[in-house]
Amino acid sequence: MNFTIRNLFFSVLKNINRYKFTYISIAAVIQFILICGLWIIARIFQLALTLAGEEYLDKNNILSILINPYSFVILNILILIVAFFMFIEFSILTFTIYGQLTDRQYSFKNILNNAWKKTKNLAGFQTLFFIVYFLITIPTINLGVKSVIAKNLFIPKFISNEIMKTTSGFIIWGFIMLILAYINLRLIFTLPLTAVGDEKILDSIRKSWELTKTGKRKLLFTIGLFEIIYIIITGILTALITIICIYFDDDGNNPLVQTLFFSSISALIFFLGVISKVTVITSLITILIDHNEISEELVNNLNENKKKSSFAITFTTIIIVIATIINGFNIYGNGVNKNIETIAHRGYVALGVENSIEALEGAAKAGADYVEFDIILTKDNKFVVIHDFNLKRLAGIKKKVQDMNFDEVVGLTIKQGDYTSKIPSLEEFVAKAKELNMKLVIELKPHGREPANYINIFINEVKRLKLENYKFMSIDSKVIEELETKAPDLETGYVIPLQFGNFHQSNVDFFVIEDFSYRDHLVEQAKKQNKKVFVWTINDSALITKYLQSPADGIITDEPELVKEEKDVLENHYSYFDKILRLVNFR
């Protein structure tokens, strides 16, 4: 890529300054189209599940859904529809920007027809290349050109957090992210090339890789410079809006002022996102024009639309009004869920090694309602409190718990961060919890080599240690349902690491679902079945605030003290400054 930072910067700046309102209007229309697209995608996905005889997709039934011929066909159609809406999004933006740069204007009808033609080109092996490209963009921000369709797709934090708990895992994870970020940078031209070029998706990938052999740092520097400018401008405007709102409503309780505040800040954040994406695409299109990579035949055949319509501006105005009304309803309706419970994940790990007596004591000091901890069966059929099957991470021993006897495991030194402790037995852990008057959530972690009477062994321990008033859960649905069947008076729960669709009809009392898969409607479904829903593992303030205002029954967290602080802020000191922080984090 042969260009100077100065020329690219001022070319992009001139274009954005001249057509900024056009881009905002177009983005509002795109947002509406993609919301409709997401609704269609969700319905088609549900159809695929129905054809496979399922109501949900998780680790237990994914294979049966994929091998079902009817659902397999529907899922392939679903991929093409996802591609179609992505092409619509980038075709509209790309052709709008290209038109402004070359004094042309294209109609929505012709742009949609072009998107449909591009989608048809994905037939056959091209679909596979699109899937690979789509998956590669998920782990990173894709340098500002990530599709709205994919913005809520991310690697679940329970996976990344577990990997990064060790130094080696942290290094490996960071290295993988750097590689993916580099690949995303090399493929940054893929979607614009597909939208305005003659190439299919694989050809666009190859062409993007070729174009980015040189000039990558100059492109990143230019984009980064714009981002800094936008953030400064947004910060200044946010401060002004906040000062005005405080002037009219110093205690932050006036619903009208709050509605205007939320709507204004939301609009600013939306504006920042749109302009950032437009900046990136404008930079890319400018470079593609300079390299003669735009298909003249394609752009000439799109029949320019010389009539300027007020449709986009009118539509944008309607969306702003609707968004303001929705914000008002949210402010009136979203109070703190006073019944939500705080469950300390493996105790309070900020005050001790996970699953240790010290972590249990720390959770009690932090005011947690429950402590969640893990138990594994030893070789001689006794339970010890530890999460990992292998002792390497915490004890530094390359042995598995299931290969060792109870006396060999209990009392082993474990280290995590600055803390040192000993592996406790189930009996020791429970005795300390009773002393602290701390309620427990016990997670059964079967390793696969348990005896046939595994559940009977556990039920006997429940009776011996008088654990009947606690909660019990497992990621193994068969194990927890067997426990529910043999001991129906116990409160049992199924831990779901990843799920799409509704909860399946499980013979348990509650579900534990991670943040990636959580939806409010799942709580409504569970309540109809007289079941509870807990969400895990929620550690940052923005997500904690979100779930404190959700219908969930409990938050499983490594930060019980932070949950307590956030709850206090929401109930007593929710200033406009707090609202800004949470709005920014939510977006």
Image (spheres, rainbow, N blue to C red):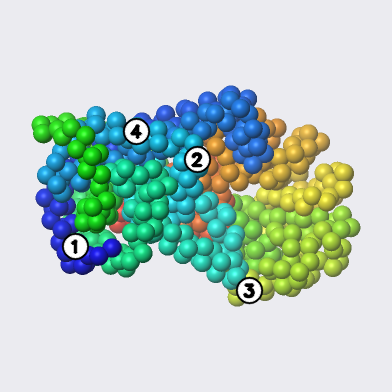
For the residues bearing labels 4 and 1, Cβ distance under 8 angstroms: no
Looking at the image, tell me whether mark 2 or mark 1 is earlier in sequence order.
Answer: 1
User: Residue, x 72% and y 72% (percent of image)?
Assistant: 396
Number of on-image labels: 4
User: Residue, x 58% and y 25% (percent of image)?
Assistant: 70
Quick one: SS at disc 4? Answer: helix
> What is the three-letter code of the residue carrying label 4?
Lys
Q: Is residue 585 above or below residue 60?
A: below
Q: Quadrant of residue 403?
A: bottom right
Q: Is residue 484 above or below residue 13?
A: above
Looking at the image, tell me whether mark 2 or mark 4 is earlier in sequence order.
Answer: 4
Tell whether 308 sits left or right of 496: left
Quick one: SS at disc 2? Answer: helix
> What is the three-letter code of the residue carrying label 3?
Tyr
Q: Is residue 568 visible?
A: no
Quick one: SS at disc 3? Answer: strand
Q: Which residue is mark 1?
A: 9
> Is 348 or 270 nearer to us in this picture?
270
Q: CA distance from mark 2 to mark 3?
A: 53 Å
Q: Which residue is mark 4?
A: 117
Q: Position of residue 385 (x, y in %)?
A: 74, 59
> What is the three-letter code of the residue carrying label 2?
Phe
Q: Position of residue 43 (x, y in %)?
A: 47, 27
Q: Residues within 10 Å of mark 3 (few under 14, many from 20)?
A: some
Q: Which residue is mark 2?
A: 125
User: Residue, x 23% and y 61% (percent of image)?
Assistant: 226
Looking at the image, tell me whether mark 4 or mark 3 is earlier in sequence order.
Answer: 4
Q: Which residue is mark 3?
A: 419
Q: Residues within 10 Å of mark 1 (few under 14, many from 20)?
A: some
